[in-house]
Image (cartoon, rainbow, N blue to C red):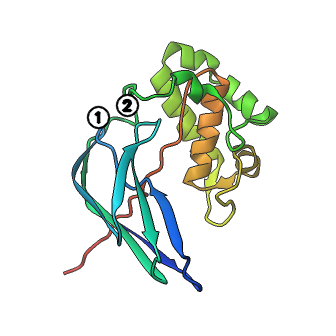
Amino acid sequence: MRLNIRHKTVYRYQDAPLFSAQVFRLTPRTNVSQRVQRWRIDCPGELSEWTDAFGNLCHTLAIDDPPEHLEVIAAGEVVTTDSSGVLPPEHGDLPIEVFLRQTGQTMPDAAMAEFAAGYGGKLAADRIGAMHEMMGDIRDRVDYQLGKTDVDSVARDAFASGKGVCQDHAHIFIGCLRAQGIPARYVSGYLAVRVRLSL
């Protein structure tokens, strides 16, 4: 699928700061499931490019006397290939064991741990198939509802309430996999919305 992406971030300062320094992680990566055809970031000032420990291409923007209204636009074209959500290991600075550690947002409670344990045998027999099944079961169990959680919500609360959004589904899935000894991590992205054009 060919995706044209335009991401716009707007800053409006009531009292413009004397100095602004920001880090942007707005550049998609080329891998087995997607290929970046073209990409650019437009903003005032000059960007410094670097790569973080996860292998993400990052940019730092530092501006003296930034304007009261500041726009950052990241745009380009990405071609995706269906890999069934499976990517080969990527080489980075962090050992794979880092992605076994639970975080505050993924830490399972007893109910989540019991749910995850129910997949133990399936994961041993067919890891990819069992992970797809678990992912589907999480989606069935936690109804997609906007406004029931926020950016600070934790997996166990969304799991218990049965309500959440993509981020909650991801955190529950990651927490369950890590509880079963499978490294997993969160990757940000865009939610594809299909637009129907009428002529």
188 to 128, vertically: above or below: below
Q: Amino acid at mark 1?
A: Val
In front of the other: 92 or 107: 92
In the picture, the disc for residue 142 is none
User: Image quarter for residue 88?
Assistant: top left
The residue tagged 1 is: 32
In front of the other: 145 or 60: 60
Q: Residue furthest right?
A: 110
157 to 177, vertically: above or below: below
Give me the residue at 68% from left, 33% from top. 102
Q: Is residue 178 left or right of residue 55?
A: right
Q: Are marks 1 and 2 in contact (CB under 8 Å)?
A: yes
Q: Amino acid at mark 2?
A: Leu
Of the two numbered discs 1 and 2 on the same chain, state the one appearing first in sequence. Answer: 1
Q: Is residue 82 left or right of residue 71?
A: left
Q: Position of residue 132 (x, y in %)?
A: 49, 33
Give me the residue at 48% from left, 44% from top. 187
102 to 156, vertically: above or below: above
Q: Is residue 96 left or right of residue 179?
A: left
Secondary structure of residue under mark 1: loop
Give me the residue at 56% from left, 77% from top. 17
User: Image quarter for residue 124?
Assistant: top right
User: Image quarter for residue 197?
Assistant: bottom left
Q: How many marks?
A: 2
Q: Position of residue 77 (x, y in %)?
A: 23, 57
Quadrant in which the C terminus is drawn: bottom left
In front of the other: 24 or 15: 15
The residue tagged 2 is: 87
Mark 1 is surrounded, within 10 Å at the Cα level, by few (under 14), some (14 to 19) or many (20 or more) other residues, namely few
Q: Position of residue 110 (x, y in %)?
A: 81, 32
